[in-house]
Image: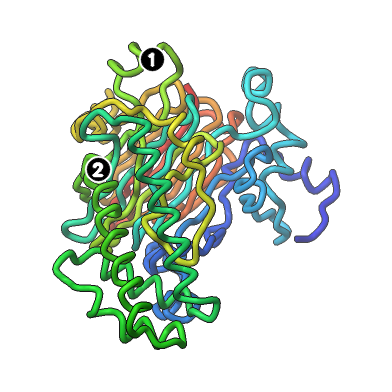
Amino acid sequence: MQSLSQADFSSWRLAGRILKTAANNFVERPWGGTRLRDFKGLCSLPDQVELTGSGLGESFEISAFDEDPEAAQYPAKVKMPNGAWVSLPRLVRDHAEALLGEQWVRRYGRCIPFLPKFLNVRELLSVQGHPAGHTEAYVIVDAEPGATIRIGFRHDIDARAYCAQLEAGRVEQYELARLLGTAARWHAVQRLLAAWFADCDRAPGDVLPTLSELCERSFAGSAASQVAILLESLRVRYWSVLDAMNEVPLEAGQVIHNCNPQRIVAARRQQPGAEVHALGNPEQREFVMLEVRRPGPTLRAWDNVRFPMRDIDVAGALEAFNLGATRPEEFVSSKVPLPEQGHYVSVSSEQFRIEHVELGAGSTFSLAGDAHCLHALAGAAELETESEVVALRAGESALVPRGVGIYTGTAAAEGIHLVKVDLP
């Protein structure tokens, strides 16, 4: 990025302008797909997963929170009028009072304490949780028919038995990795075994020949028997862990609020947190969503027998989990109409508030409030402030500083679905 003088900043009058962030702040993930670039109107890379072993799993949209390792690693960037790019964390640190307001700075510091991201999920993510106070919301942009995620336990969980199950599965996976050998082509092994684990009708013998080729070693006799026994045992654990959680069907436009139900919060007498969750599904039915969460650690309890193996923290995750039973419907948020036509609110919590603007072609609207994030999930709109007109199309995001005040918008020919995210 080019260096910028103080004059560059002052001449731009940051506080009164809508700050669009770069649309290509992508992160490859082993569970990612190939739809993010298409969604954002960028050049497609349909062969990426096959070539690299990972798809584009995430796009960090508004990332300016250096205390979070991931946010610090993938800071959002803003393009200045002279063509130079500057990191959003730098802008926020240098101009926090003007951009966010003094009250915001006193309460949260010189940062943006939430982390909106677009996710493209193709394979199962880990079974994971977050510390108390860290909830999440998922606004579904698009989903293949039958796509699901898992949130919360279906029945009460015995912590000791659950922990023993996960740790035993981890030991079995280490032993399987040892038998497969260091020469294994792990990304190809993962694709092969993910499909096998998902299909309970297939025997281990169906994959052993291909597995031998990928690991450059022959599985015969006792070695083949050991591999087969481990595969069968791990598949039982794989499905036992998934079946212990609620399965939530997905569809475009839906909002999932991953937050302990109020009855759980009252019983635990602590800040609400996210329930145990595993985004994605064994069938690899793909979806794209906007995820909104407070920055903070992710605690993996189980990684669905993924190769290459990643770190997990069973004890830490179980400490964060609510082990009591929940129901799928407790996580599906309704869009409650607001007085303005086409405006709705879906989440209003201690952590963040999510509003929607859903209007047809040519419709006009206005927005206001303190500093907030704006994300286009579908269509396009022209946003007009006192000093400029800014186009925002599907897949793009912006930080709207508090100095912008009231601004108006006009939906383009295809209409618009905007999501506004701000603090309570």
Q: In x, y percent, where is residue 140?
A: 30, 48
> Can residue 177 be seen at all in this image of the molecule?
yes
Q: Secondary structure at mark 1?
A: helix
Along the viewing direction, whichever of 2 and 58 lies nearer the viewer? 58
Q: Callout 2: 10 Å neighbours few (<14), some, many (20+)? A: some
Residue at the spot 43% in from the left edge and 33% down from the top edge: 318
Q: Secondary structure at mark 2?
A: loop
Q: In x, y percent, where is residue 185?
A: 48, 79
Is residue 63 found left or right of 315 in the rendered image? right
Between circles 2 and 1, the one closer to the viewer is 1
Q: In x, y percent, where is residue 314?
A: 47, 41
Residue at the spot 42% in from the left edge and 61% down from the top edge: 173
**Mark 1 belongs to which amino acid?**
Arg
Quarter residue 321 falls in:
top left
Residue that carries the numbered disc 2 in the rendered image: 254
Residue at the spot 14% in from the left edge and 68% down from the top edge: 201
Residue that carries the numbered disc 1 in the rendered image: 268
Q: In x, y percent, where is residue 142?
A: 27, 56
Numbered circle sitting on residue 369: none
Is 247 located above or below residue 196 in the figure? above
Cα distance in 3D space between marks 2 and 1: 28 Å
**Mark 2 belongs to which amino acid?**
Gln
Along the viewing direction, whichever of 354 and 324 lies nearer the viewer? 324
